[in-house]
Image (tube, grey):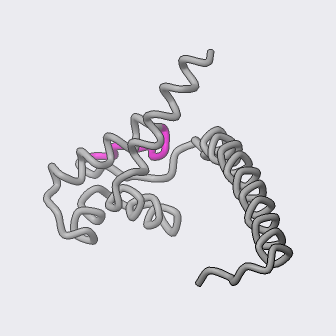
Amino acid sequence: MVQFKGTRLDASFAALSDATRRGILEQLGRADASITDLAQKFQMTLTGMKKHVGVLEEAGLVTTEKVGRVRTCKLGVCRLEDEAAWIESYRQVWAARFDELDTIVAELQREERAGGRKKRK
């Protein structure tokens, strides 16, 4: 299970690492769109847009449905809950580290004042 979760996180973060793909998700958050519409909106070729949508689809962030000649894209079922939890765990680690650093800096400043030394600028 851990391996699957890691693989899914890898796919999600890889998909989200590209600005165009993040823009596609933002656009689909407003309304479903065809690949042709997305390609025009982002000023790229259909082939390029299909590749971006494919990456998003593999990550579960987008689903597509073909009706006739039109492939419509919409947001997928993945709600990024696992990704948000992973980020939150590291945010907490960094927050704790910065709190410790603040404590050390405050202690050094107290020692500096108590020792009569001038403050560094």
120 up-or-down from 102: above or below: below
Please give the name of the residue rendered at 74% of the width and 49% of the height, measured from the top-left corner. Answer: 92
Q: In the shown orientation, is residue 111 left or right of residue 26?
A: right
Secondary structure mainly formed by the magenta segment = strand
Please tell me whether residue 12 belongs to the stretch shown in magenta: no
Residues in magenta? Answer: 60-68
- Image coords of residue 51 (percent x, y): 24, 44
- Image coords of residue 87 (percent x, y): 63, 46
Q: In the shown orientation, is residue 112 left or right of residue 7?
A: right
Please give the name of the residue rendered at 25% of the width and 68% of the height, measured from the top-left corner. Answer: 42
- Image coords of residue 79 (percent x, y): 62, 46
17 up-or-down from 1: above or below: below
| Viewer-side residue, 75 vs 20 | 20
25 up-or-down from 109: above or below: above
- Image coords of residue 102 (percent x, y): 75, 64
| Viewer-side residue, 91 vs 62 | 91
- The answer to which image quadrant residue 20 occupies is bottom left
Please give the name of the residue rendered at 76% of the width and 59% of the height, measured from the top-left corner. Answer: 104
- The answer to which image quadrant residue 54 occupies is top left
Q: In the shown orientation, is residue 28 left or right of residue 98?
A: left
Q: In this figure, what is the number of numbered marks?
A: 0
- The answer to which image quadrant residue 43 occupies is bottom left
Q: Residue furthest front?
A: 116
| Viewer-side residue, 31 vs 49 | 49
Q: In the shown orientation, is residue 62 left or right of residue 109?
A: left
Please give the name of the residue rendered at 76% of the width and 51% of the height, measured from the top-left corner. Answer: 96
Quadrant in the picture for the N terminus: top right
| Viewer-side residue, 109 vs 28 | 109
